[in-house]
Image: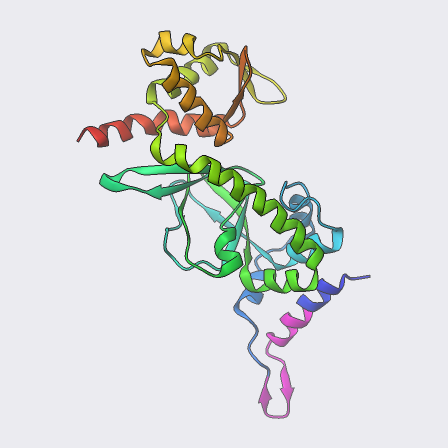
Amino acid sequence: MVPFAVQGVGAQLRRGSGAKAGPGVAAPAAPRWCYDLLVNRDPMGTASFLAQTALLGGLSADELMFLGATAATVQWPQGHTVFHKGEPGDEVFIVRSGLVRILLPADAGREATLAFMYPGSLFGELSLLDGGPRSATAVAVEDTLAIRIKREPFMVFLRRQPGAGAKILAALAQRLRRADELLYEALLEDVPAAVVAALQALVQTRGVQTAEGITVPFDATGQGLAAETGLAADSIRRGLRLLRAWDVLDYESDRVVIRQPEALRWLADDEPAASDNQAE
């Protein structure tokens, strides 16, 4: 039995296929998002991937199949700007592979990193829900493959499945709460380049791959890195908290786990250039 939602998608496609509604009367034009469905040749595979994400994993098989059928797959090269702050936004993205940086432009060419989006991460949801402009800029840090869902089919989905909408809104509320906690440090604190470089050196010389990520010995007081970098221990701890808020790493009393080594590598490559720009 085909889920009702997928049947509805088929009806939308048939209405946009050029068939006539009656003698001498052209069929009404299908919504623009219908043509995006043709891009996704594997809706079941997309639904299976969505089931593994933290935000959508609690949905039923029928709900996931509808989203899989209404999604399109997009690909961005390294350095591509997905969208700019202030642009109109009517779609949401879920990273399938690669890495995306969410940032706010600041004065003198500086940028404040708000978050990194890893495989399974959803971003652009605020504009999806209210149709307003983008609240931040998104840039692909490396070649990235993502799933795109347009606002119109997503709103249809929420109207038909209010229970699913409640699950998604609850998950989004948790993310917004975390974003509120992060915003102050993200805007006012930079992760010192020396801290990133020291962590990257630890990964290369003493890192051990584990199921959690790359694990290296660590002194949670910051005294060890302070001796290596010449920075104050308080500054190091603030930088580490921000890296943890970005989900780049986590740490305990005697070890640090690099969960997203590609983000740490990007920061290690980017920080010297940022410092040079500030010096000018």
* Position of residue 179 in the picture relative to residue 14 (left or right): left
Residue pushed farthest right?
1
Image quadrant for the C terminus? top left
Residue 130 among those drawn in magenta? no
Q: Is residue 238 visible?
A: yes
- Residue 262, percent from left and from top: 47, 29
209 or 42: which is nearer to us? 209
- Residue 217, percent from left and from top: 52, 10
Which residue lies at the image location 64% right of the left edge and 71% below the top edge?
Answer: 12
* Residue 42 vertical position relative to residue 25 in the rendered view, above or below: above
Q: Quadrant of residue 10?
A: bottom right
Image quadrant for the N terminus? bottom right
* Residue 264 vertical position relative to residue 116 in the rendered view, above or below: above
- Residue 4, percent from left and from top: 75, 65
* Residue 247 vertical position relative to residue 155 in the rendered view, above or below: above
Residue range highlighted in magenta: 10-26
How many marks the image carries: the answer is 0
Which residue lies at the image location 26% right of the left edge and 27% below the top edge?
Answer: 275
- Residue 124, percent from left and from top: 49, 50
* Position of residue 72 in the picture relative to residue 51 (left or right): left
Residue pushed farthest bottom?
23
Q: Quadrant of residue 263?
A: top left
Which residue lies at the image location 67% right of the left edge and 40% below the top edge?
Answer: 52
Q: How is the image coloured?
A: rainbow
* Position of residue 237 in the picture relative to residue 188 (left or right): right
Q: Is residue 98 visible?
A: no
253 or 270: which is nearer to us? 253
